[in-house]
Amino acid sequence: MRRVAFDVLQAVDEREAYANLLLPALLTERRITGRDAALATELTYGTLRGQGTYDAILGAVSDRPVQKLDEPVREVLRLGAHQLLGTRVGSHAAVDTSVNLAKDVAGVRVSGFVNAVLRRVSTRSLDEWLSILTRGMDRVDELAIRYSYPRWIVEAFADALGSDPESALAAGNERPHVVMAAVPGRATRSSVLPADASPTPWSPFGFTLAGGDPRELTADGRVAVQDEASQLAALALTRAPLSADGDSRWLDLCAGPGGKARLLHGLGTESGARLVACELHEHRARLVRDAAPGSVVVADGRRPPFGDAAFDRVLVDAPCTGLGALRRRPEARWRKSPSGIPGLAELQRSLLRSALDLVRPGGVVAYVTCSPVLAETSDVVLDVAASRDGIQIIDAPALLPEVPDLPASDPRFAQFWPHRHNTDAIFLALLRKP
C-alpha cells in the first residue's frame, strides 16, 4: 500500500500526474482492494493535503531544507510524517515501514537519515508542532502552515470571503463524498437511488454515495459523477427568464469533459431545446459526445464557427485555476501560481465576450468557474459587462432560492463554498443581453 502511495506521490511531483486518475489505475493494476486500497488512498491524499504542513515540520527537524533533498527521500519523509501525525498508524510501524520504503526506492545509504528525521517528528503531536511553528506568525502565515496552503491562496480566499478564511481552508482539506447525478431524460433520482445513498439537499438530480465504486452506477449512462454545485449552476441557467419568445437553442461553449453538457442536454431534451457543445480539444470532445450525444463541435470558443447563430442560452464553464475543487485534487494547490491568473483571466474575458456575441437579444449567458478567486470571477464579469451597453446582471441567488448563503462579493453573483454548502467552491454569474 505504501509503495502505491509513494509511486503516486512521485508521479504527481515529477510529471504532474493527477492523483485521482493514477491512484485507481495502480490499485486495479496491482490488485489491491478492500482495507489495503483504503489505506493506500488515505496515505496518498492525506500526504498531498498536508504537504505544506509536513514540509514545515520536516524542515524544523532536519539539517537540510526539504526542497534540497533528493525527490524519493522527500516523498518518503512526507509519507512517513503523515502516518505519524495524521493517521492511527503506530509510531514504530510508521518509522519502520518508511525506512524500509526508503531502502527500496533510494538505497540503503539514506535509511539512517530517514530514521533519524522521522523519530524526531514522532516526539510531538501535530498540534504541538503547529503551536511551535506558528508562534509569532502573522495570521496569513499561520493559516498557511496550519492548513497546508500556499500563502497566496489563503489571501485569495480571504479576499473572496471578505472575512477570515479558516473555515473554508479547513473544509478544503476534508475528504469529500462521491456525489452523483441522475441524468434528466434518462432517469429520475428515485429510479436510480441506491438504498444506502442520501439525496442531495438542493439539486433534484443529485445523491451522495455512502461508499462503494461509483463506476458500478455509471455503466448504463443514466447516472454520472457530478458535484452538487455543478448541477445547480447548470440548472440556474435553465431557470433564468428570457426576454422575447424562443427557447430552443442552447450552447455549451467550453463543454469538456461534459458534466454540465450532459445535464443541459437532458434538460433540453425534456423541454424541447437542442444543445450544441463546443470544445477545443478533440480528446475532450470525445468525452462530451459520450456524455451528451448530439451536436459537438471541435473549435476554439473564442472563435467559434457559428457565424451569426443566435442561441437562447449559453454556458461559459471557463478554464480556471480549479482552486474550488481542492478537496478532490489536493495537489492543485502546489501546482498553481498567482502568476498564471492574469493569462487565465484574459482567456475568461475572451470567452465571456464570445458568449455575449453568440447569445440572441434577450438571451442569457451563464459564466461559471470552479474557483472563488476574485480575479477569475466577479472581476471578469464586471469588466466585460461594463464594456457592453445594456448588459443586465441577473440576480443568480434568487434563481436558486432553495440554497442558503450564496451571495458573493457582489450580491448578484452566487458563490458556493465547501464549508457552507459541502460542495466545490463554484462561482456563478448570469447575464442577459439587451
Image: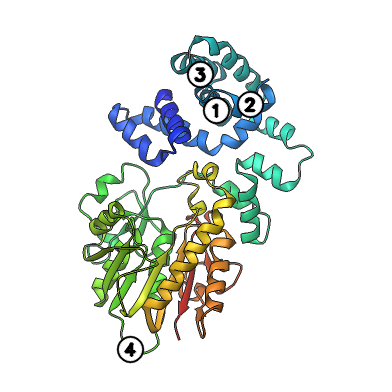
- Pointer 3: what residue? 98
Sooner in the amino-acid sequence: mark 2 or mark 1: 2
- Pointer 2: what residue? 58
Q: Are marks 2 and 1 in contact (CB under 8 Å)?
A: yes
- Pointer 4: what residue? 245
Please state, as top left, top right, bottom left or bottom right, where the C terminus lies in the image. Answer: bottom left
Sooner in the amino-acid sequence: mark 1 or mark 3: 1
Counting from the top left corner in percent of width and height, residue 408 is at 58, 67
| Separation (CA) of disc 2 from disc 1 | 8 Å
- Amino acid carrying label 4: it is Asp
Sooner in the amino-acid sequence: mark 2 or mark 3: 2
Q: How many marks?
A: 4
Mark 2 Cα-neighbour bin, 10 Å: few <14, some 14–19, many ≥20: many
What element does badge 1 sit on? helix
What element does badge 3 sit on? helix
Counting from the top left corner in percent of width and height, residue 261 is at 32, 63
Counting from the top left corner in percent of width and height, residue 96 is at 51, 14
- Amino acid carrying label 1: it is Arg
| Separation (CA) of disc 4 from disc 3 | 67 Å
| Separation (CA) of disc 4 from disc 1 | 60 Å
